[in-house]
Image: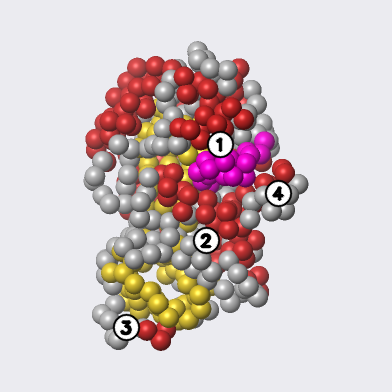
């Protein structure tokens, strides 16, 4: 469907985590923006708009997934129940070398986009190889995306000569910068143990020159300091600081193994931290001290990581696990309230990713919205927004609007043929012995 005015009526409206849901509301979108909203008593008279009945529905901002490797849907379930080093080096890297190509990235990213849209995610930050094909898949699916071309210092899919890895990223940035409102290209340096200091600095310089985010995996495992290439500091974070890579446009992924000095460095730099609690649990990486960092003032965001290490892309499930693991880690039931988890998946992720007008419902913000069915046993009674985190999940999402377009209606994807996509992914999976 093309962009137009959309009027949602008689709905429970949840504008942001700091505001209580309000019953019997209406909301009007015009083109790609939220125009206005209010109580049903003030409903505009017969506007020319697509009408959506919000009875027994809750309308909220679309969720933002701040870290994913979308094409890795192909490897979902391929190598479960393994620790990080064995999982990555003995299974994932070899599988990527053998099976990652343009066709794989396109179709498997499209499958991830469908899964995310169906579970209420309207924006995703992605990092992988052949990222031009990921951007193409995102564009066709309708999801808002920050695709970041991956960088490593060894032959990688699409970049067989690692001496050209920075050039490959610049080609990607030049092609996609300002190409479409929904796509913001970015730079993804895999980690300090796969990228040497010179590569990291060149990657960050490129991101700065193009005014785009710089993503990096950091401090994910206990042994990471021992495997960093040419360490310049006594911890992974101090290594990045010594290379002058930390600022407000740097997005630090994982940050499980930090000490107090690391956290102070991050705070002073203005960098954001994105945690992926289910991936951390599955790979036994540990539990990031997200509540501690949040209390310090470090922006804390939330991602799922890729399907190979989660294995779900449902951010409702991720919010629930984030809140509960922080309670478990601290033995304090108040350490990470549901409201903070909601912030991580909306307002905070938008801030970390540099998205000024998404993540909440407000006039002139992007019309990225989701409608949930609250007339379900697991959603009743609905006392407050905590139930969004602790009850139900992405399967309650009925309608998704992204950039003013209805992308999902009555749980039917409108932007592309999902059956065709799943068929193509199954074909790609067959050589891996999954079928």
Is 418 displayed left or right of 90 in the figure? left
Residue displayed at 60% across by 69% down = 384
SS at mark 2 in the image = loop
Contact check, label 2 and label 3, Cβ < 8 Å: no
Disc 4 marks which residue?
327
Residue placed most toward the observer, 143 or 18: 18
Measured Cα–Cα span from mark 4 to mark 3 = 45 Å
Looking at the picture, how far across and down is residue 311, in whole percent?
59, 46
How is this picture coloured?
Answer: secondary structure
Measured Cα–Cα span from mark 1 to mark 2 = 23 Å
Q: Nearer the viewer, mark 1 or mark 4?
A: 4
Residue 254: give its label. 1
SS at mark 1 in the image = strand
Looking at the picture, how far across and down is residue 216, in whole percent?
47, 31
Tell me, yes or no, whether the highlighted magenta stretch contains residue 290: yes
Is 311 displayed left or right of 37 in the figure? right
Instruction: Give, as a single range, the part of the protein colored magenta.
Output: 286-303
Q: Nearer the viewer, mark 1 or mark 2?
A: 2
Disc 2 marks which residue?
17
Residue displayed at 41% across by 32% down = 247
Quadrant including the C terminus: top right
Measured Cα–Cα span from mark 2 to mark 3 = 26 Å
Residue placed most toward the observer, 80 or 283: 283
SS at mark 3 in the image = loop
Disc 3 marks which residue?
44
Earlier-in-chain disc, 2 versus 4: 2
**Residue 306 higher or lower than 363, as above or below:** above
Q: Is residue 261 visible?
A: yes
Earlier-in-chain disc, 1 versus 2: 2
Earlier-in-chain disc, 3 versus 1: 3
Quadrant of residue 130 within the rendered picture? top left
SS at mark 4 in the image = helix
């Amino acid at each position: 469907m093309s962009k137009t005015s959309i009027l949602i009526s008689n709905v429970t409206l949840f504008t942001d985590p700091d505001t209580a849901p309000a019953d019997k509301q209406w909301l009007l979108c015009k083109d790609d923006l939220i125009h206005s909203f209010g109580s049903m008593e003030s409903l505009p008279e017969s506007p020319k708009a697509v009408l959506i009945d919000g009875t027994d529905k809750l309308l909220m901002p679309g969720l933002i997934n701040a870290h994913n490797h979308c094409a890795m849907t192909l490897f979902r379930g391929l190598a479960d129940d393994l620790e990080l080093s064995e999982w990555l080096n003995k299974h994932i890297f070899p599988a990527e070398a053998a099976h990652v190509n343009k066709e794989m990235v396109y179709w498997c990213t499209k499958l991830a986009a469908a899964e995310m849209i169906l579970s209420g995610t309207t924006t995703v930050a992605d990092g992988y190889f052949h990222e031009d094909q990921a951007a193409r898949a995102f564009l066709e699916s309708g999801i808002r995306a920050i695709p970041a071309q991956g960088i490593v210092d060894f032959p990688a899919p699409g970049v067989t000569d690692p001496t050209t890895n920075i050039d490959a990223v610049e080609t990607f940035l030049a092609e996609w910068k300002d190409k479409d409102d929904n796509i913001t290209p970015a730079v993804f340096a895999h980690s300090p143990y796969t990228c040497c200091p010179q590569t990291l600095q060149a990657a960050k310089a490129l991101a700065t020159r193009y005014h785009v985010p710089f993503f990096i995996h950091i401090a994910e495992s206990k042994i990471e300091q021992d495997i960093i290439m040419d360490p310049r500091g006594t911890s992974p974070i101090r290594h990045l600081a010594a290379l002058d890579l930390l600022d407000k446009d740097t997005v630090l992924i994982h940050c499980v193994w930090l000490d107090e000095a690391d956290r102070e460095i991050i705070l002073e730099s203005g960098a954001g931290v994105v945690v992926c609690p289910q991936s951390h649990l599955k790979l036994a990486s540990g539990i990031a001290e997200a509540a501690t960092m949040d209390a310090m003032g470090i922006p804390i965001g939330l991602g799922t990581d890729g399907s190979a290490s989660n294995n779900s892309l449902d951010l409702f499930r991720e919010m629930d696990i984030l809140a509960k693991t922080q309670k478990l880690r601290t033995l304090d039931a108040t350490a990470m309230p549901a409201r903070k988890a909601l912030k991580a998946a909306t307002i905070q992720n938008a801030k970390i990713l540099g998205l000024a007008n998404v993540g909440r419902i407000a006039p002139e913000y992007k019309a990225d919205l989701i409608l949930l069915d609250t007339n379900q046993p697991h959603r009743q009674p609905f006392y407050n927004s905590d139930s969004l985190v602790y009850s139900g999940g992405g399967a309650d999402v009925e309608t998704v609007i992204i950039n003013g377009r209805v992308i999902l209606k009555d749980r039917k994807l409108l932007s592309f043929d999902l059956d065709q996509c799943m068929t193509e992914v199954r074909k790609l999976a067959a050589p891996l012995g999954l079928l």
